[in-house]
Structure formats: structure tokens, C-alpha cells
Amino acid sequence: MGRDSSNMPRDLTSDARLAYLRWLAAKENARRQLYTRYREFYAGDAGYEIMERAVKFLDLPVGVEFDINICDIPVDVMAERLAVSALTCESDADQEEMWEWWVRNRMDGVQKQVHRGVLRDGDAYVLTHYDEAENMPRFSYELAYDGSWGMEMIYNEDHTPEMAVKRWQVHNPEDAGYVHRKNYYTEDAIYKWISD
């Protein structure tokens, strides 16, 4: 998913542009709320009251908490069944190197987290950075941004990725609080932001 500016009016001061931006912000906020909701269901924390009819059917005493949530089961079963079985490269040497990076990054285990994340949330990301010391790329699983922390993609007019944004918090023991971090990843640069 991510932001899509393909329908954005060009006049920066127009009422139509402001209305479009409000609509886009509301759409993004709704998507983030869904990520949170999906994660709550997966964790069994949906917080729904059982219907009176079900209480009678199950013959439950009044005031007894009852919870049944099996959302995690189909997600986990499907995630266990998904696996990357091949990488396609232009040459055999490139393919061997890619598999070496795959193994060294322990992607056999990380891919299960990625698959679980995308099955649960609808989106999940693998962030890649270059490790100078090891002379190889590193891969890390990143959750979709839910309004608190995670990754999100921003697309341009032709629906190709324009940038990725990673947001997270770091505990600051000196200030007894948290420092908010945000990295913007574009094709040719990384911009880092740290709150005071």
C-alpha cells in the first residue's frame, strides 16, 4: 500500500488539493488503524463482547469472561507453508552470491516473519542496507507503519515507489522518555530525523 499522489490536483493552493490531502490523510489513518486491529485479532485481543445468544448457547454463567480467537491459526499455517525456494539472477555466480547472502542473513527464518506479517497486516517490508565490514547487504524485517512505528511506502504518480519511511522510538534514559526516529529512503539518499 502507501500514499498515492496520482490524482492530486497540481495547483498547490486550490481547495481541491487541500480536500484531496485531507482525504488522503484520512485514508492513510484508516489503513494504520486496520494494521493495529489486525494485530489485535491475531494476538487474541480483539475486545468484542460475546453476543447474548452465544452466551445462552454455550450455557455460560453471567459475568464469566469467554474468549475464543483462532485468527492466528490460519495466518501461522499459511506462513509456515510459504517459503522462498529460488532466486533468479543473470548469472550462476550472481545466484550463488545471492544464496550466500540469503543464508548469512538467516533469511530462512526471517522470511517466516515477513510472510506472517504480510498475511496478518496485508503489508510487510524487508529493509536492505550494505554492511561495509562484511562486504555484503543486510536484510531486516520491518512491520507496516501503524501510526506508532514501522515502515511505509510512498508512491509517485505512475505508482512506482518514490520513497520508504521507517519510524521508530528509542528509549532515552537521560530524559526518562523516548526519542522519535524517522528515516526517509530514496533512490539515491537516506535522510535521518531525530526528535529532541
Image (tube, helix red, strand yellow):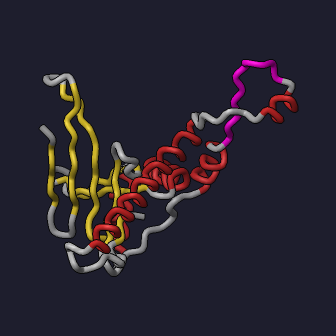
Corner quadrant of residue 48 = top right
95, above or below 79, in the image: below
Residue 119 counted in the magenta span? no
How many callouts does the rendering have?
Answer: 0
Residue 66 counted in the magenta span? yes
- The residue at the point 82 percent across, 23 percent down is 60
Q: Nearer the viewer, residue 95 or 83?
A: 83
- The residue at the point 69 percent across, 30 percent down is 67
Q: In the rendered view of the protein, which quadrant contains the C terminus? A: top left
28, above or below 179, in the image: below
Corner quadrant of residue 52 = top right
| Residue 102 screen position, x and y as percent | 38, 57
195, above or below 89, in the image: above
Taking 121 as reference, is 157 left or right? left
* Residue at the outermost front position: 15
- The residue at the point 32 percent across, 54 percent down is 139
78, above or below 162, in the image: above
Q: Nearer the viewer, residue 183 or 14?
A: 14
Q: In the rendered view of the protein, which quadrant contains the N terminus? A: bottom left
Taking 84 as reference, is 50 left or right? right
Q: Which residues are magenta?
A: 60-70
| Residue 41 screen position, x and y as percent | 58, 41
- The residue at the point 36 percent across, 71 percent down is 4
| Residue 142 screen position, x and y as percent | 37, 50
| Residue 158 screen position, x and y as percent | 34, 81
* Main secondary structure of the magenta stretch: loop
Taking 95 as reference, is 82 left or right? right
Q: Nearer the viewer, residue 101 or 15?
A: 15
